[in-house]
Amino acid sequence: MSKYFKAGLFFTIAALLVIAYIMKTADRFEGKSYYLLYADMEDASGLIVDSNIRVAGVVVGKLKAITLHNNKARITMQLSKDVKVYEDAVVQKKMESMLGTSVVYLMTGTPGKRELQNKDTVNNVISNTVLDSTMENMGAISQVAYQLAEKLKTILDNPKTDGQIADIIDIAHKTTKDTSDMLRVNMITLQSLLKNMDALARKVNNQSDEELRKISLLIDNSVNLTATLDKMLKTNDADVRDSVIALKKTLAELSEQVAASRTTIQNMNNITTDINEGRGNVGKLLKDEELYDDIKNISNRVSEYMDSTIGLDFVVDFKSEYMFKHKSTKDHFGLTLVPGKKDRYYSFSIINSYRDSRSNTTRQITVTDHNDPSRDLDVTINERKESNKLLLSAQIARIFGPLTIRGGVIESSGGIGVDIAPVSDVYVSGEFFDFGRKENPYIRVSGTIFPLRSVYTGSFYPLRWLYITGGVDDLAWDEGRDYFLGGGLRFTDNDLKGVITVMPSM
């Protein structure tokens, strides 16, 4: 038993164990009798055909199909007949993982109301997830913030408004400073007065009646002093009038500044009205329907380009072939990228094979002539050595119905290939490459079949990913011709999502 056969046997056993583990731990819907219900959703993105349908966390059916009906996504639910659904039932789509996959949750409704029968439609549908609602709210908030910023920018860009705002700020700054200074002086005076009153109160409490009499006399003197000051103020009445005139002048200037502020606010209102009615450069920019249509068309084209370049599906493929003549294995690991239109694909493969590693060497030895032992003969020996090496393939393919034509690098040399699908899940392939080889071009003919795909249609049946392949290798060269038989596993990105969703938590 060669080391390559042992390696192939090890990987085969490991793959079978993984498949058995996935089948044993996967959620299954084993209802023998079922019926169908429909529901129309605004958005069915993230849902996968054959995913579970749950009621209170319990699997009660499968998502049978997703189709387009009256511009809505119609989902077909296959439910166990043990589950009773009533006319006020609710179907809700919920996110299940960070990969973007979603599942269908069913609230069966109120017992006693009309029970839904086979192929009836559930009318209450919630298709928006929490993430969708959050993104819509964020979009609305962003739009309001953008409009407010545009209006503020328009106001600030006006030189006249800029000068008026600067004057208002300067006046407010001066007024605030004067008020602060006056408040500080008054607070100091009040603090001193309170201290004096406190000291006076303590002295009053500690003094005798004689001292109180002296205090009363002091108050009388203070009254007389106040009368004297009043007479002095009347004498200097002109100075007081001048102070009042100065105060009136200051108030007049403040009134003029307030009027200027009102003018600024009116200008801001006029600017906003012009924008809303489509006048001026900014108003025309916001109200021009033709400009909006141009921007919308550009956005649609960018979206189409992103879908065609970034929105790729991918297929991961691994297969191992046993070569009967050379008693060795050829192992393939490939990655295929499929654009959204599904009319072409790009494939990349790494192959571990003995091909192109065979080399002929010539060696001369000297032997004794049996007929004449005294004479030596020079003999030429041709030797061939074989060893495995890594080969690369990179191809571009176009699909025309059941016919696929591909070309590029095949096993580290230029070549072309043709694939034909005569029936579902059966493929016949031919490859032609290494045209510069001195023997003959390299020709390989093979057939591939997915034996269990038509039996198990659900993504949760791992055996549907298994395929068998066989054929003839290096057909045109008699010495290199070999027959092979093998198998492999092929996963799409939806298959991988299905595997991740049914894997148990560790």
Image: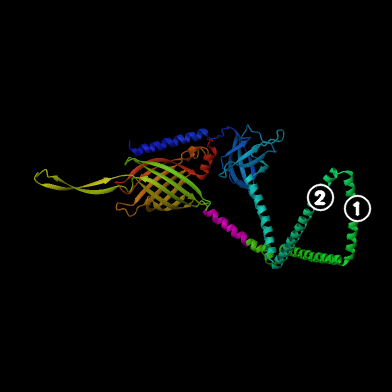
Q: Which residues are magenta?
A: 294-309
Residue 48: % across, % down = 56, 43
Q: At 35% across and 38% down in the image, what residue appears?
A: 5
Indicate left or right for 201 with 358 as reference. Answer: right
How far from the left and from the top, in percent, is residue 111? 70, 33
Disc 2 residue type (three-letter):
Asn
Q: Which mark is residue 220?
A: 1
Observer-side mark, 1 or 2, equals 1
Q: Quadrant of residue 353?
A: top left
Task: Say left or right for 387 vs 48.
Answer: left
Question: Crowding near pointer 2: few (<14 within 10 Å), some, many (20+)?
Answer: few
Contact between marks 1 and 2 (CB within 8 A): the answer is: no
Residue at 89% from the left image edge and 57% from the top image edge: 226
Can residue 42 be spotted in the picture?
A: no
Identify the residue at horizontal 68%, vertical 38% (top origin).
Answer: 89
Front-most of residues 296 and 143: 143
